[in-house]
Amino acid sequence: MYCIEPTPECPAPPADPSDTHVSADITYSTTYTASLSEYFIDPVTGQYTNTLTVTPSDAHVHVEAGYAPSGQPRITTSYTDGADGATAAMPQIVSQDLAGDYLTDINPYGYSLVTSTPDSMQAAPAMDLVGSTANGDITAGVLVSIADTLASSSSVGTMDTPGLSPDQARSSRFGIPSEVPAAVAFARASSSGEIVAARLHGIPVRIRLAGRTVLVVEDVPGDASAGIMRSSSTASATSSRDKRTRKFVKRSEGWVLEEDRSEVDFDDEQGHRHAETVTTYRNVKIFQNPQRDAHRRAMRPTTDWIPRSHNSEVRLEEQAARAIGFSSGAGLSRGAMAVPGQARRFVVCDDGCAGGGSPPPTPASTGDDPPCIGDVRAVVNSSTASVNILYQHGFLSSATTWCQMSRYVRERYRVGSEIRHTLNWRASYEDQSADLQNRIRNDVVTNPGPYVLVGHSNGGIINRYTAQDLRDASLVRGVVTVSTPHGGVYLANISERVLVGALSVPITGYLLGCDLANAYVCTRGRALAGQAAIALAPILASSAAPVIQEMGTTVPFHSTINGRGDAGYRYAGVRNRVWDRWSLWRLLADSQGCPQGFFDCDNFSRLFVTDIDKKYHHYIKCAVVSGLLGIVWSGARATARGCATNAAILRVTDAAYKRLSVASGHGDAVVPEFSQMYPGAPPNLQFLVDDSDSHLGETRSRRTARGVLNALNIGIGIPFDQ
């Protein structure tokens, strides 16, 4: 079979064992510290501090790099950590195969993944940062050949700087680093013990011997090409300092890269941030075929960096679109697809991803559908009803938040009367409850009870307080709380300034790598903290909303309401646990709502997060590939650094937000899971929705609806009607 590009039906040929090949185990580690200008309560320690330190879990990658029979690179990366078992509905990447310039992602089931970007995240693919790998040297970034350095060091005695012309040597003595081959600079540093200043493909470095078999290569500060940026304005002043060092260890075949360390310090009016990313190479094994390497070197383009074309990806996507009946590749611009074995069979990965396909359709909603407006008092079924329900919204919300959830409930229950009121969400819990009690007394005049009070977030607190005050069986049949902060919310302990400062992970030091293409993190990373602040502004501390003063984890209100008890009616709690990874992006996607025309609104944020996870793995792959090719093209060296840092930024931002929102535990990206537990309810009445949507998407989620239905059925004791 003849193939233009590798496809699932036409895989790329394996690497040629007689050609040059490399294998290694690579670990990416990151530590981030924010020293802010404002103090806050650390959710983990419970102490007042102005310092936040997070260390996300390391990424462990095994890489096998070689050449196909055609002589072009073939680089396979496997994520030895495997897929995260905490989520089953994400088509996660566990390995990647780069054949020439075409990348294939592989999921845990061995299928290749064809994924594309939601409209709200359009950006150039991370792998476009790499450029073309045609005739690339897969050892260039990790190996400086001993043979080359020995040849270079043979002329040490004849010139002040070996291998340089007299003019180059003079410029080097006067402190102006000259462009030299890596082998020349390494030879000088290892033989003389001096600190050698040079330019390696446009980057000024200092090379020094650190022990008999270790060379350290340090980027020279103060040069724009090394990633140093300082800027100021009349509104605020910012500065950043960037440091990068690489450590090479001497082995029989040459100087082999062992560690690549990057550090960034960033200062602005919100405080000081320090980020450190370390890439460690272990078990590096290299086999070289000098003849074929020389042939590729002769065939290599003379330009420094060749960007690859989008055409191959577009053609493949169009082929796949035609195979499943779409009129054009644009039909694949939504969601994430798995391709099991052949391109003609696509499975949408949603609730039924592990088994393939979507779950079976549910029964139609029974009775009349009340209007989706801000205040509803409606009779849904005029006879044979099994339950009356009052839905209560939470913070910065309204009665319309329940429109979708109420339909899910009516698929299983014949609801008699349905009430949804919009209250003044800014008012204190007590004032909102008093308002609701008056409304209920008016409601039952025309729509008799009793009612099950179902409340989301703060609405659960209001419903509990109301039921405790009323304690009237003719009015209240039971209470169901959904992601309700019975123990408070950590985010209510901090200010918007703290949140923005903590999530403003420094990226200016890495713009060199980002400049090579329009990468997602580079173009949107700085705005991410602002987007988060907008989405979370209602939850952040503000004296403008009295209820905020009762939402923190350290305020006395929670012990007061919990001490009042829930005697006289049945109750149950529904708690939501979102996937711990990428919870901030899940929240942001849910805050946007489902785009008009999207084919799977119940899974929009899930697919959004899938794309974030894909981008993270693509940045790692980009770093691996560019790192191997590192000293061939100056662009590759900068890209390896930029991509590794972009991956680190995603993980650090994610970890920082998780610490501020749910500490070291679980939650729904806003309310910690411990706080969602209904006080006094036994374990069998605490219904967990695992791998759920985030706090801002739960009332639209079918997954959360299952928890609500179980709470009504088991907790309140209402049999299903269908």
Image (tube, rainbow, N blue to C red):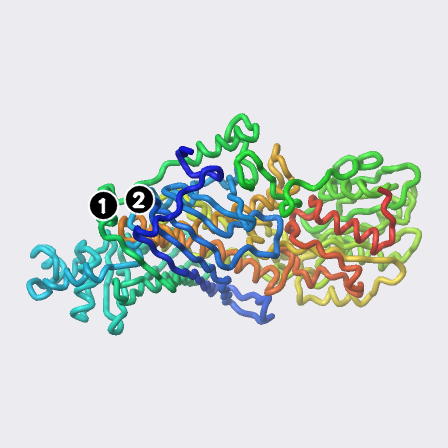
Considering only vertical position in the picture, is 309 above or below 290? Answer: above
> Of the residues under marks 2 and 1, which one precedes in the sequence?
2
User: Residue 162: which quarter of the image?
Assistant: bottom left
Label drawn at residue 638: none
Q: Residues within 10 Å of mark 1 (few under 14, many from 20)?
A: few
**Residue 700 visible, this angle:** yes
Q: Amino acid at mark 2?
A: Gly
Q: Position of residue 116 (x, y in %)?
A: 51, 39
Considering only vertical position in the picture, is 102 above or below 154? Answer: above
Q: Quadrant of the C terminus?
A: top right
Q: For the residue labelled by badge 1, is the local secondary structure a helix, a strand or a loop?
A: helix
Report the side of 90 relative to 10 (left or right): right
User: Residue 158: which quarter of the image?
Assistant: bottom left
**Closer to the camera in the image, 639 or 268:** 639
Mark 2 vs mark 1, CA separation in Å: 9 Å
Identify which residue is drawn at 62% across, 41% down: 593
Q: Residue at label 1?
A: 295
Q: Residue furthest bottom?
A: 211
Q: Residue at label 2?
A: 71
Q: Quadrant of the N terminus?
A: top left
Report the side of 45 relative to 425 (left or right): left
Report the side of 633 relative to 44 (left or right): left
Callout 2–callout 1 Cβ contact below 8 Å: yes
Q: For the residue labelled by badge 2, is the local secondary structure a helix, a strand or a loop?
A: loop
